[in-house]
Image (cartoon, helix red, strand yellow):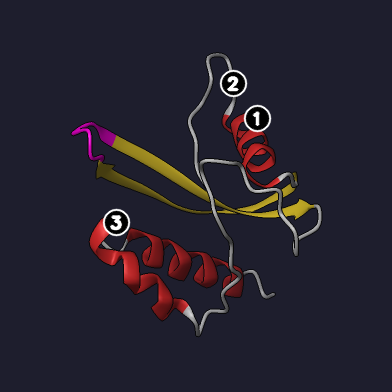
Amino acid sequence: MGGHLEPGETVAEALAREIHEETGWHLAEVLATVGDYRYTGEDGFERWETDFLVRVDGDLARPQLEVGKHTEFRWLADNELDVLDESAHINDGMIRQLAEDGFAVLHGLGT
């Protein structure tokens, strides 16, 4: 899931909006920042991405996936991340790295 800031919008507002638009869930709490990543997009523009570990309210078994952005979802445990290597050639392994960083933060929180 991802998105951009709208004019006049704070990062927290954009995060809540994007979560709701793409899943139907509501942001309950930002637990931690997972990391900041810089990369060059397919359009040649440099991007800066900040990723967060969040708690949401909603039916986690049945997200309302945003049409045109997502076709399916899957929950992964930290020992199932190899499946993310299937798309590593598309995103230079960034998705797996993000998941690994997220689990590291989660484990550091003591959950």
Which residue is pictured at 53% across the width and 50% down the height? 70
Q: Could you tell me the amino acid type at mark 1?
A: Glu
The quadrant holding residue 77 is bottom right
As drawn, which residue projects farthest toward the right? 58
Above or below for 8 versus 73: above
Q: CA distance from mark 3 to mark 1?
A: 26 Å
Q: Position of residue 101 (x, y in %)?
A: 45, 66
Name the outermost residue toward the left. Answer: 44
| Callout 2–callout 3 Cβ contact below 8 Å | no
The residue wearing badge 3 is 91
Query: Residue pushed farthest top?
Result: 8
Quarter of the rendering containing residue 110: bottom right
Q: Residues within 10 Å of mark 2 (few under 14, many from 20)?
A: few
Between 36 and 59, the residue placed more toward the observer is 59
Q: Is residue 20 above or below residue 11?
A: below
Q: Nearer the viewer, mark 2 or mark 3?
A: 3
Q: Secondary structure at mark 2?
A: loop
Say left or right for 67 vs 88: right
Question: What is the x, y in percent for residue 57?
Answer: 81, 51
Q: Amino acid at mark 3?
A: Asn
Q: Tell me the residue that label 2 is attached to.
A: 9
The residue beneath circle 1 is: 13
Between the residue at mark 2 and the residue at mark 3, the CA separation in whole angstroms equals 27 Å
| Depth check, front residue: 18 or 39 | 18
Number of labels in the image equals 3
The reply, left or right, for residue 41 in relation to residue 106 is: left
Q: Position of residue 80 (x, y in %)?
A: 49, 82
Label 1 close to label 2 by CB (< 8 Å): yes
- Identify the residue at image location x=53%, y=79%: 78
* Span highlighted in magenta in the image: 41-46
**42 falls in the magenta region:** yes
- Split into 4 quadrants, where in the image is the C terminus? bottom right
